[in-house]
Image: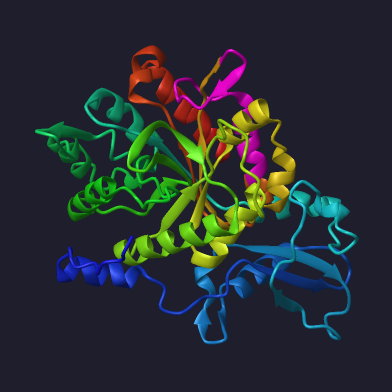
Amino acid sequence: MAAKPDLRYGSTNLERRNAMQPQAAPIRNNHLQIVVAEGKVTLQDLHAALDKAIQVVAGHCNCGLTGFDVSFLRGNPAQRAPYLLREPEYQDPFRSTLDRQGEVAQMATTTQCLDSVSIARVAIGATYEGRDRALLERMLPLVDYVEVTLETISEVHDGQISLNDEIMAELKNLGKAAKIIVHGVGLSIGSHDGCSPTYLQLLDDFLDQIDVQWHSEHLGYTKVDGQHLGIMLAMPKTQEALDMVCERVRAIQERYKLPFLLENIVHVIPDFPGEYSEAGFLNAVTEQTGCGLILDVYNLECDAHNQAFDIPAFLRELDLTSVREMHVACGVEHNGFLLDVHSQLTRASTVELAQRVLRSAPPSDRVVIYEFMPEAVPGLGRDAIAGELARLRAAFN
């Protein structure tokens, strides 16, 4: 897909969007080590860590950190720099800090304090596909973000697909009640013959009318040789596939000048042999393009159930600093196969897995989205959906 200049916005919007782009790269995801003489961490030490993390470093304001870790090391501050900033080494996300080969001198009395500064704010969001004002009114007091799927809010007239005017008016009227993010299904970024021009046109039209925080798509493909499969399949984890998807991600980033995220999908069939593991492929995409990730933890549970996927090994390898958004949902089991059909309230295991990931990830503001299909609303009920959102807000904050 060839990149095109972003000429669709007026000068005011274009200037604002350009201003949102980073002008200088801040120090990101650093590990701050504080040397303390007695192996005892005080509140003053914690304040010093925060002050150091946001100070101006190398000419750049470090308040743009996506997150930082803090370690308190026993030693003599007079002989060692009391504050040491370094890039974090990889750590097993499911190994406690007490097991890290003695690197961190963490006292039992300070565990609660360290936990409190290691988890950043988690916002809550939910899908909304329009035409249900009663549901929207129940959701808005409980969510920070509304996730919109363009294909679901579109309609076909005379063979042409376009966004539904009534739903677009609803979304425009949200104002400051919730921020909007776009989550695609039909881009088919993994198709060998290119991304879907129809989806790109829908996205163009949507962004002409509504401001969004970021947009995203599934890392997979839904068509082959122009023919829709009726299902989404995972990409092979080969170097050729990696090069192709990275080129397309860069073109999308250039076209829209907005943060772009990719989501891990359910593997309905076993993976084609390739040079990369699942996590290794995602890491390579984010490293080469700078795009973010959506981590759908229910998709991981489906793969574990259906394909004996090793979730702990995957999470140990995955660079969690790239995860900006997480999805929780629940489907159904059919003939022993767990389906990614968003039609139920989340299971306790799904929420616990998401919490586990967040505790393991470097501190950064993230969004947890509860996904459900509009067809599931009558069966679930608006009260149950509102209750679920309240439960998730309590679970993650």
Residue depicted at x 54% and y 66%: 288
- Which of 37 and 18 lies nearest the eye of the viewer? 18
Res 260 quadrant in image: bottom left
- Which of 375 and 324 lies nearest the eye of the viewer? 375
Is 143 situated above or below 205?
above
Left or right, 37 with reference to 49: right
Is 104 situated above or below 373?
below
Residue depicted at x 76% and y 64%: 71
Residue depicted at x 34% and y 20%: 375
Is 58 situated above or below 37?
below
Residues drawn in magenta:
334-357
- Which of 198 and 349 lies nearest the eye of the viewer? 198
Residue 267 point in image, percent of width and height: 57, 35
Residue 91 point in image, percent of width and height: 76, 57
* Magenta-colored stretch includes residue 21: no
Residue 99 point in image, percent of width and height: 87, 53
Residue 72 point in image, percent of width and height: 79, 66
Quarter of the N terminus within the rendering: bottom left
Quarter of the C terminus within the rendering: top right
Res 348 quadrant in image: top right
* Magenta-colored stretch includes residue 352: yes
